[in-house]
Amino acid sequence: MKRITILIAEDEAEIADLIALHLQKEGYHIVKVADGQAAVQAVQSQPIDLAILDIMMPKMDGYEVTRRIREQHHLPIIFLSARTSDFDKITGLVMGADDYMTKPFNPMELVARVNSQLRRSLQFSQPAAAHKPVLEAGGLKIMPDQHSVTLYGEVIELTPKEFDILYLLASHPKQVFSAESIFQQVWGEAYYEGGNTVMVHIRTLRKKIGEDLDKNKYIKTIWGVGYTFNE
């Protein structure tokens, strides 16, 4: 069985040790670093299956760490931060994080979220994912095996969650998905405070695929109901 490795990037040693203790009980291998630069180096030098990042770290903050990781890797990223404002949460998600928890936190809830993210990530990595069909619509090409998207031949850089949302909608054209349904299917967990999370991902996804420049929108909002994909 493959050993699952989790990166903890946290400059407060007590918090890092607490997280490591609970995750090690789950059987995970832990790599701990205390600054952002070391976090990037860890991901580049060894297989990391999931990263838990603080935002305020020495040498490089969590936002920049996430940006650099996303240049080459699709591993799940969870922010664990003392920053509690909606702006900080939205910024984290837009930068490419898959989840955001605030301090103080319940260690068991963090473990549950780690397990949820890993289930989705490992399911995607299975060979069966390669059998998902390539989808094309109006210049948009969605390739699940490469986890990539092009628009009229130009590569569009999406985060893993943005890709999953787009593929979900595009694979069921004209079907309307509520924010709750999208959250449950893409995040793979119960719907809690997920409305804004879905909305933010839809908003950034639209910008990346040129919705503001194209009158024929790919993603249509059905007010009061949810979202649908136009072929």
Image (cartoon, rainbow, N blue to C red):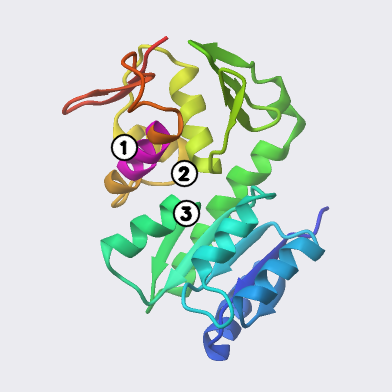
x then y, percent, for residue 45: 81, 65
Q: Are marks 2 and 3 in contact (CB under 8 Å)?
A: no
Q: Nearer the viewer, mark 1 or mark 3?
A: 3
Choose between 76 and 122: the one closer to the eye: 76
x then y, percent, for residue 205: 42, 35
Q: Are marks 1 and 3 in contact (CB under 8 Å)?
A: no
State which region is magenta. 198-206
Which label sits on residue 227? none
Q: Are marks 1 and 2 in contact (CB under 8 Å)?
A: no
**Amino acid beneath label 3:** Met
Look at mark 1 in the image and give the residue it sits on: 180
> Mark 1 or mark 3: which comes first in sequence?
3
What SS does tag 1 mark?
Answer: helix
Q: Residue at 58% x, 89% y: name it.
A: 13
Look at mark 3 in the image and give the residue it sits on: 95
Q: Residue at 53% x, 34% y: name it.
A: 163
> Mark 1 or mark 2: which comes first in sequence?
1
Look at mark 2 in the image and give the residue it sits on: 187
Mark 2 crowd level (few <14, some 14–19, many ≥20, 10 Å Cα): many
Secondary structure mostly seen in the magenta stretch: helix
Instruction: Please say if 77 is above or below 137.
Output: below
Q: Is residue 161 magenta?
A: no
